[in-house]
Structures are given as structure tokens and as C-alpha cells.
Image (cartoon, grey):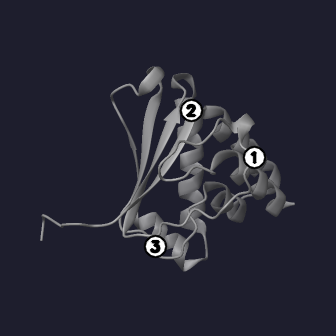
Amino acid sequence: MRRWIAFGFVAVMLSATATSAQQPAAQAAAPPTARVFASDGGMVLNFIKPDKTGDFEAVVGKLKEALQKSAKPERKEQAKSWKVFKSPDPAAGGNVLYVFVVDPSVKGADYTVSNILAEAFPPAEVAELYKQYAGAYASGQNFVNLTLVADLGK
């Protein structure tokens, strides 16, 4: 059951590519793929409805909890390098931009939010988190791989 919930959640929420925004949840039809950064780091741009920022941040809190309580070493490593930022400036259409910054990325680790949540919480709770997360999105998300060109601090 947990796998099916994760499958549905991934299919709906996280089928974006690095160059195009995710389709709205109701239109997503592509099979899910693991969200693995293929480079040194990455960003995920999340476009959230202004009245749903509390829902989005609540799910981010559960994501943090899931990463921290996981027995998987890669989840602990992901937590160390995964930060969530909120732009103080309005995004297109008056939406709110949240940015996941992952630096460095954990090679081979899956960053699919639904998979991480499904590992840590019972199916009924994951289903509720899915409703919150999916309902918060305005126009979708962009998944961006980044390759380090220069480290100006070293």
C-alpha cells in the first residue's frame, strides 16, 4: 500500500525536468522517476499558492522529520546538505517561490519527497501529507542540476 501511495504522489507532484515546470497536478500523466541529482548539486524551484504556504511548510517540516529519523545513511547525508529558502519577493502570478538548495548532492540518493515521506510515516498520514503538498502548488516545480564551476571561497 505504501508503495502505491508513493507512486501516485510521485506521478502527480514530481515529474518536472530541469528545463520545464511540472504540469499542474491534475494533468500529470508521466510515470514517476527517481529525483536524483546527476551533478554536484541542484535546486528545486517550487511555485506555491500564497494561501497555501502554511501547508507547504508543514510538509517540509515532516520531510525534515523523515530525513532525521531515517535509518538510511544517505538520508542523514541528504539532510545535512538540503536547505529550503522562501523568496521574500512575489513570484509570477503573485505566487510564492520556495527553493530547495542541495549542495553538495548525495550521489545516487533519491530526492523524491513522496518516497522519503513514505519511508517514515504510515500510509494514511502520507495520503494526508500528499493532499497538503499537492494542493499547495500553483504552477509546479523545476528540478535543476548544477555543476560547480568555481568555489570563490577557496
Q: Is residue 82 visible?
A: no
Separation of disc 2 and disc 1 at Cα? 16 Å
Mark 2–mark 3 contact, CB under 8 Å?
no
Q: Which residue is mark 3?
A: 106
Which residue sits at x=63%, y=62%?
A: 116
Question: Which mark is in front, 3 or 1?
Answer: 1
Which residue sits at x=53%, y=42%?
A: 21
SS at badge 3:
loop
Question: Which mark is in front, 2 or 3?
Answer: 2
Which residue sits at x=77%, y=57%?
A: 7
Q: Earlier in the sequence, mark 2 or mark 3?
A: 3
Q: Position of residue 56 (x, y in %)?
A: 56, 38
Q: Is residue 151 left or right of residue 62?
A: left
Category of crowding for the residue at label 1, using alpha-carbon neighbours closer than 10 angstroms: few (below 14), some (14–19), many (at least 20): few
Q: Is residue 43 left or right of residue 9?
A: left
Q: Which residue is mark 1?
A: 29
Q: Earlier in the sequence, mark 3 or mark 1?
A: 1
SS at badge 2:
strand
Q: Position of residue 108 (x, y in %)?
A: 53, 76
Q: Which residue is mark 2?
A: 139
Q: Amino acid at mark 1?
A: Ala
Q: Is residue 80 left or right of residue 76?
A: left
Q: Is residue 137 left or right of residue 100?
A: right
